[in-house]
């Protein structure tokens, strides 16, 4: 590779990173915060879905289904949840867990979907965003609710 070609590639990568395109293209799950949460733009699957995993085998299967390496073992005192948005026509979409807490006789995971602003510059590729979060174990049945 010539020095000029290397400069062009480096400039394109910097420009993409500044536009927020490069993070949306990554296949690796990224730790979103200290609450043991990971998000990705690719791998969530073609249809909207939610999943609760309570065992290490289910946890490993979840990460295999996302085509992403397992970031850690599932802690014995926790369970995991996954929310997938399904197929989207462009980048700029994301899913986030807003809250996860007992409500009466259920444990409710509230989530939201972020959409790109009109006219936003986003990757022109099919995406299937997901979020995975580890939550302290509960014996209550888990339900999911989308935030308005």
Image (cartoon, rainbow, N blue to C red):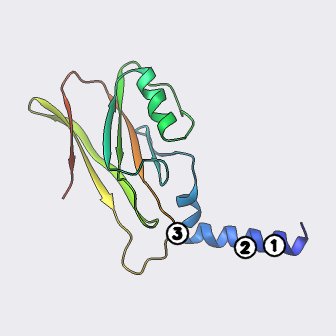
Whether tag 1 and tag 2 are in contact, CB under 8 A, the answer is yes
Mark sitting on residue 11: 2
Sequence order check, earlier mark of 1 and 3: 1
Q: Secondary structure at mark 3?
A: loop
Badge 2, how many Cα within 10 Å: few under 14, some, many 20+? few
Whether tag 1 and tag 3 are in contact, CB under 8 A, the answer is no
**Residue pushed farthest bottom?**
119
Tell me which corner region of the image, top left, top right, bottom left or bottom right, holds residue 59: top left
Q: Secondary structure at mark 1?
A: helix
Q: Label 1 vs label 3: CA separation?
A: 22 Å
Badge 1, how many Cα within 10 Å: few under 14, some, many 20+? few
Q: Label 3 vs label 2: CA separation?
A: 17 Å
Q: Position of residue 51 (x, y in %)?
A: 32, 36
Q: Secondary structure at mark 2?
A: helix
- Side (left or right) of 145 relative to 40: left
Q: Label 1 vs label 2: CA separation?
A: 6 Å
**Residue pushed farthest front?**
46
Quadrant of the image for the C terminus? bottom left
**Residue pushed farthest top?**
76
Task: Pick whichever, 55 or 45, lies toward us.
Answer: 45
Q: Which residue is mark 3?
A: 123
User: Residue at horizontal 51%, vertical 34%?
Assistant: 64
Q: Position of residue 92 (x, y in %)?
A: 43, 66
User: Residue at horizontal 57%, vertical 50%?
Assistant: 27
Q: Position of residue 8 (x, y in %)?
A: 78, 74
Task: Pick whichever, 51 or 39, lies toward us.
Answer: 51
**Residue pushed farthest left?**
104
User: Residue at horizontal 43%, vertical 47%?
Assistant: 44
Q: Is residue 81 above or below residue 90?
A: above
How many circles with numbers are drawn on the protein? 3
Q: Which residue is mark 1?
A: 7
């Amino acid at each position: 590779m010539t020095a000029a070609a290397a400069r062009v590639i480096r400039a394109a990568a910097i420009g993409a990173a500044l536009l927020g395109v490069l993070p949306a293209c990554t296949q690796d799950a990224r730790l979103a915060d200290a609450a043991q949460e990971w998000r990705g733009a690719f791998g969530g699957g073609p249809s909207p879905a939610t999943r609760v995993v309570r065992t290490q085998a289910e946890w490993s299967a979840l990460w295999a289904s996302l085509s992403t390496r397992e970031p850690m073992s599932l802690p014995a005192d926790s369970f995991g949840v996954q929310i997938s948005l399904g197929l989207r026509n462009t980048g700029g979409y994301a899913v986030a867990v807003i809250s996860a807490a007992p409500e009466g006789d259920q444990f409710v995971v509230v989530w939201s979907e972020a959409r790109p602003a009109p006219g936003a510059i986003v990757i022109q590729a099919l995406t299937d965003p997901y979020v995975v979060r580890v939550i302290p174990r509960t014996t209550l049945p888990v339900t999911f609710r989308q935030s308005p």
